[in-house]
Image: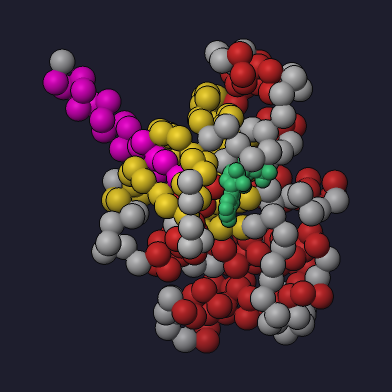
Amino acid sequence: MNDMRMTERGVDSKNIKMKARKVQVFYGTNHAIKDVDVDIEDKTVTAFIGPSGCGKSTFLRCLNRMNDTIDICRVEGEITLDGEDIYDRKVDPVQLRAKVGMVFQKPNPFPKSIYDNVAYGPRIHGLARGKAELDEIVEKSLRRAAIWNEVKDRLDAPGTGLSGGQQQRLCIARAIATGPEVLLMDEPCSALDPIATAQVEELIDELRERFSVVIVTHSMQQAARVSQKTAFFHLGNLVEYGETSKIFTNPDDPRTESYITGRIG
Ligand SMILES: Nc1ncnc2c1ncn2[C@@H]1O[C@H](COP(=O)(O)OP(=O)(O)OP(=O)(O)O)[C@@H](O)[C@H]1O
C-alpha cells in the first residue's frame, strides 16, 4: 500500500507544475475566488473558461502574483510551483514572474525596438554574459514565437510598428526570453483577426512542448482547439476541471453543461 502511494506521489510530482489549494481572493469585501483547488500539469495547455466576471483572470493572476500589484486585492490559500510556495516571504515576485511569464489581452510591446523588447527581461535578470549571448537569446525567442522570419531584417525598428498579431507574437517572444516554465495567457487572441488568431493558436500548441501554458479564453472553440485540460469557473468557484474532451462532451456538472451549450454566460 505504502509503495503504491509513493509511486502515485512520484507520478504526481513529475507531472504537476503548479498546485493551488484553498485559494481565496478578495477585492475589498468582494469575494472573487472561493476555495479553489487545482493542479496545473507540465507541458500541457490548460484553458480557464466561464462567464464574464467569474474570476478567470483573477485566478490566473494569482499564479504569478500579479494581483500583488492591486492594492485592494488579498489572496489566501496556497499556490506552489514545483512544490515551492510562491507566496513565501522569501520569494521575489519579479524573479517569480520570470519563471511564470504572462501575455496580456492587448498586445503591449514596450516603446522600444523589436530587439530591445525581447532583450529587456534577459538584461534585467542578467541572463546573458555578453552581446553574442544576448543576440542568441533574442533570436531563439523570436524563432520560438514564430515571428523571426518576419522581423529578422528590422530588429531595430520599433515593436509598436508591427501589426497586432505580430505585436502579440513579439510579446510572447518577450515572455519566453527569460526562460519561463509556465506561460500565462489572458485572452491572448481577443484583439486579433482570425488569421493572427490561428497563428497564435498554432504557436500555443508548439509552446506546450516546452512550457506549461494556462490560457483564459472566452471562446469555447479556442479552448477546445488548443487545450488538453479545461477548468470551468462560475461565480468565483471552480465548478469542474478535467480533460478538455470530457468537459465539452460529457461534463459532470449541470452548470458546465449550461455554459457550454450557451444557456448561461
Ligand atoms: N482590479 C480589480 N479591482 C476590483 N475588483 C476587481 C478587479 N479585477 C476584477 N475584479 C472583480 O473580481 C471579479 C472577477 O473578475 P475577473 O476579471 O477575474 O473575471 P473574469 O472571469 O476574468 O471576467 P472577464 O471574462 O469579463 O474578463 C469581478 O467581480 C470583478 O469585478
The relative height of residue 60 versus residue 3 in the rendered view (above or below) is below
Residue interval drawn in magenta: 2-25
Q: Position of residue 78 (x, y in %)?
A: 33, 44
Residue name at image x 55 percent, y 51 percent = 184
Residue name at image x 76 percent, y 22 percent = 262
The relative height of residue 46 versus residue 61 in the rendered view (above or below) is above
Please identify the residue farthest to the front as the structure is shown. Answer: 29
Between 7 and 240, the one lying in front of the other is 240
Q: Position of residue 173 (x, y in %)?
A: 62, 64
Between 53 and 169, the one lying in front of the other is 53
Is residue 125 visible from the viewing direction of this image? yes
Q: Is residue 22 magenta?
A: yes
Q: Position of residue 66 (x, y in %)?
A: 49, 59
Q: Position of residue 163 (x, y in %)?
A: 83, 66
Is residue 47 visible from the viewing direction of this image? no
Q: Is residue 117 magenta?
A: no
